[in-house]
Image (spheres, helix red, strand yellow):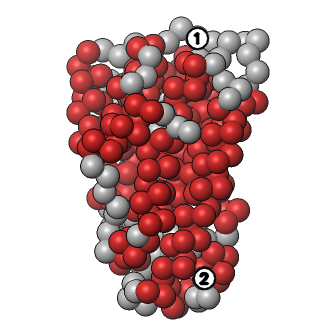
Amino acid sequence: MPKPLEARPEEFDHWLALVRQSAPDMYLANLLLPQSLKTPAFGLHAFHVEIGNVIGANHEPLAGEIRLQWWREVIEGTREKEAAGHPLADWLTRSCAQRPFWRKALSAKLEAHVFELYQDPMESRHMLEGWCGETRSVLFQLLADETLGLDDEAGPATTASGHAGCATGAIFVLQNLARSHAKGQCFVPLDLVAAAGLSVEQFLEPLGEQHVSLIKGMVDFGREHLGQAIAALGGLADETRSIYRPLALTRAYLNSMQRTPATLLNGPVELSQIARQWALWRGPR
């Protein structure tokens, strides 16, 4: 494993502010990581936030694709001069040069995020799991790789990462249900929509009680993957296990959503600062 690539102080400060503002749950979880993991964690999560900002800022899919292509070229190392003036792009260029496997994984992540720019439905649970794997599991896996030596068994981390990505992806779908619905996008897998007794046309009708059973189905999807992720953590060393601390918040969100699913019809579920800090301190269980 290559030596951890440190960030310049001004780069790291930029990531810290970006993640704190746009992904406060990631920010709080990263603060509890071992010092050796904070640079890659905040760098990768800042990249995740930047992608989200591209998607949120572009109502025209082509404009979003052009910006995502810029990031893809940064990762490939063909935007080196432009990247040198950017507090995240420069670090990504250097990191991917040292870790070629990052280049493949992060390029696949960018490709998967293109789906969010359009209004195509999520065809199936299997498709959602694949999308979660490429957009979210990859972040857990790359960080886990930073802790594993050449002789370490990677199986438990790979299993934990795969299911952790699906569990956190379920939270994303549920938290953004009202917003994606307003855009006319069916992000909930069509087989779960059908299991709730709805057609796509009915799903796109104004959100109401008919959508509650669908929400419950997505909560069950998240719980299933959360349970499998946590089961895999027992085979991991403490440093690697620390990467999966956000799963404690995943459980807290799912518990709240299960108690009052109709809340999601109006927008995201909120956890108090104390509840978030307490869950993170206890860790996933």
Label 2, secondary structure: give it.
loop
Q: Is residue 10 left or right of residue 90?
A: left
| Of pointers 2 and 1, the one earlier in the residue sequence | 1
Which image quadrant is residue 236 in?
top right
User: Which of pointers 2 and 1 indicates the residue nearer the eye?
Assistant: 2
Which image quadrant is residue 49 in?
top left
Q: Position of residue 4 (x, y in %)?
A: 49, 12
Q: Nearer the viewer, residue 70 or 246?
A: 246
Checking the image for residue 55, the label placed there is: none
Quadrant of the drawing holding the N terminus: top right
Q: Is residue 159 left or right of residue 112?
A: right
Cα separation, mark 2 vs mark 1, equals: 48 Å
Task: Give me the residue at 73% from left, 16% from top.
Answer: 152
**Dot 2, how many residues are within 10 Å of its Cα: few (below 14), some (14-19), or many (20+)?**
some
Label 1, secondary structure: give it.
loop
Task: Give me the residue at 40% from left, 86% from top.
Answer: 208
Quadrant of the drawing holding the C terminus: top right
Give the vertical position of 138 relative to 81 (above or below). Answer: below
**Dot 1, how many residues are within 10 Å of its Cα: few (below 14), some (14-19), or many (20+)?**
few
Q: Nearer the viewer, residue 117 or 15?
A: 15
Q: Amino acid at mark 1?
A: Pro
Q: Position of residue 247 (x, y in %)?
A: 51, 42
Give the vertical position of 245 relative to 125 (above or below). Answer: above
Task: Give me the residue at 60% from left, 82% from top.
Answer: 196
Per the image, the residue denoted by label 2 is 196
Circles 2 and 1 in contact, beta carbons < 8 Å: no
Give the vertical position of 38 relative to 49 (above or below). Answer: above
Per the image, the residue denoted by label 1 is 2
